[in-house]
Amino acid sequence: MASTPTTGSPSSGKSPAARPKITINGVVREFTPGEMILQVANAGGVDIPQYCYHDGLSIVASCRICLAEVWAPNPRNNNALEPLMGGKLMPTCQTACTDGMVVYTDSPKSVANQKAVMEYLLINHPLDCPVCDQAGECTLQDFSYEYGRGVSRFEEQKVKQPKKDLGTHVYLYSDRCIMCTRCVRFTREVSGTSELLVAGRGNKEEIDVFPGIALDNELSANVVDLCPVGALLDKDFLFAQRVWFLKSTPSIDGITASGDNIFIEHNEGRVYRIKPRTNAAVNKWWITDEVRYGWKHVQSEARLRSPMRRMHGVLAESDYSRAYDDAIAGIDGAVRNGKRLAVVVSPMLSCEEAYLLGTLARAIDPKAVLAIGPVPVKGEDKTFPPGDANGFRMYAEKAPNARGVRRVLEAIGGSGSVQSYEQLLKTLGHGTGASDVGAVLLTGNYPSAWATDELMGALGGKFVTLIDTLGSSLVDAAGVVLPGATWMEKAGSFENARNMIQHFEQAIPVVEMAKSEGQIAMDLAAHREGKRAAAYNAAETRRAMAAAHATLSVFITDVSMPMTGSLAEADMQVVEL
Ligand code: SF4
Ligand code: FES
């Protein structure tokens, strides 16, 4: 323990600019009035054990592991440092900082409390870490090593509690629960659905759902992330993978307009789960179940895996070179015959890919139609808790980059030049049969089949080059099919519904022969000129975009890069024996 100073040094009286300070285990930290000791410690990298506290929930100070010895200057005694509350240990999560305060979580009294709390929490906790999904990311395990006694004095029978199926996505293994109540508070304070409660008293206390009501709200699986132990488990991830094998790549929601910050967790090219990545300006600490589980098309059996070209009326697998030859011949032929090219850029694609596709289109045909693919909308926007305009927002728009695609295509084609999907259908002759378009370069990348009857009808008689990820009826209408890459398989940037442009990284390799749409656009441009394309690089493309169009300079100045400081690193170190 650091030596206890005899007088405090409140900084507020000395300089109007000086911020108040607190000393935690000898580390001096500035704070904003109103902040709790634990919040300042967490922000400043000072370790204090904690279970019930969470930045996004109310403070209940119930687990008692964060208690510490706190001293504060007494203005009635010449600012001499005196123990707060007569020397009682204080919950650092619920005690506001004051200037000159000195906190010890490493004093004998604090350490004794930590050991006592750990011993108490472990009394009824089963020793099933080897089969528990939380092992490796469990704070009960971690704090047991760091702050626990190392031995148990408990010789009685542990209380056995049941496993429960709480709802669509979540199991509860009750006997692992340490009653931090984070999950209960989440359903009351964030989702606003209040399905969970604490039932019973003493060592019979357990988490439960109200009779007949399942944990089935749109944010339900966030309770799994909140649970500090392995009590609440994700059905989708159950026994799927040991967490220490997972690599975490920072990314952005690729299926809705939210731009929610996520980690894609994967191993050997397979994705196992999605976790929220904290961003106070976007998704706070949460993601919807839709974002968490809506990525399964990435690993679908229906993925397009190889280029195809139509020969004698039949589509057959091909290499890229011949598929590119056919695509270019078909498009150039239509333009030579006085017809226009229409390029349909899906709102599922990145800004960089929209730029490369739009530039390619105008290089082939200066009068090319630039259009944005259909932007799916489901229901209405919702906020959580309901009615809280500053709460977590779930977007009805189910595409990640409609704004970014439009922004980029308008920079290439001019303001007002970009056709919506409805306008495109008319341009292609839907309803009239008359169209000056002879070739269509069509991109998809939606999580499910997206072709409408109107589109299928309007494509008739035109040369179609399809770049898509999933097999569909569109494949049958195409002259050339090129397999695209989902957002997990490439880097880029999306502009979300808040008009924030955010970069995402490639998490896993592309499936088989698929390529990012950006690479395909570069390949086609180079192939036309008999050259070999460079490798697609999102950052370089953004620089080129900003250099070519003043209106795209935001892609240099305003792209949020993922903060990777919080990337999960393996705790284990290999040591020589
Ligand atoms: S189930 Fe998990 S989150 Fe809920 S009270 Fe128990 S330990 Fe806390
Ligand atoms: S984290 Fe402070 S009492 Fe639980």
Image: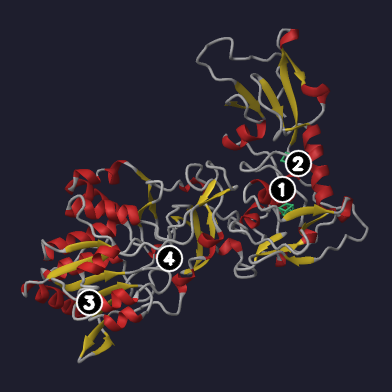
Residue type highlighted by circle 4: Ile
Q: Is the distance from the Cβ of mark 2 to the nearest ligand 2 atom less than 8 Å?
A: yes
Q: In which quarter of the image is ligand 2?
A: top right
In the image, taking residue 190 as reference, residue 287 lies left or right, namely left
Number of other residues with Cα within 10 Å of mark 4, as a class: few under 14, some 14 to 19, many 20 or more: many
Measured in 3D between alpha carbons, the distance from the residue under mark 3 to the one under mark 2, in whole angstroms, is 64 Å
Which residue is denoted by mark 4 in the rendering?
508
**Circle 2 or circle 1, nearest the eye:** 2
- Residue at 83% across / 63% down in the picture? 161
Residue type highlighted by circle 1: Phe
Number of other residues with Cα within 10 Å of mark 2, as a class: few under 14, some 14 to 19, many 20 or more: many
Measured in 3D between alpha carbons, the distance from the residue under mark 1 to the one under mark 4, in whole angstroms, is 33 Å
Mark 1 and mark 4 lie on one chain; the one further toward the N terminus is 1
Q: Mark 3 near mark 1, Cβ–Cβ under 8 Å?
A: no
Looking at the rendering, which quadrant does residue 525 occupy?
Answer: bottom left
Query: Can see residue 6?
Result: no
Residue type highlighted by circle 2: Ile
Q: Position of residue 266 (x, y in %)?
A: 50, 64
- Residue at 53% across / 62% down in the picture? 290
Q: Residue 464 carries which label?
A: 3
Measured in 3D between alpha carbons, the distance from the residue under mark 4 to the one under mark 3, in whole angstroms, is 29 Å
Looking at the rendering, which quadrant does residue 135 occupy?
Answer: bottom right
- Residue at 51% across / 48% down in the picture? 283
Query: Can see residue 498?
Result: yes
Residue type highlighted by circle 3: Val
Mark 2 and mark 4 lie on one chain; the one further toward the N terminus is 2
Q: Position of residue 254 (x, y in %)?
A: 42, 60
Q: Is the distance from the Cβ of mark 1 to the nearest ligand 2 atom less than 8 Å?
A: no
Which residue is denoted by mark 2 in the rendering?
65
Measured in 3D between alpha carbons, the distance from the residue under mark 2 to the one under mark 4, in whole angstroms, is 39 Å
Which residue is denoted by mark 1 in the rendering?
143
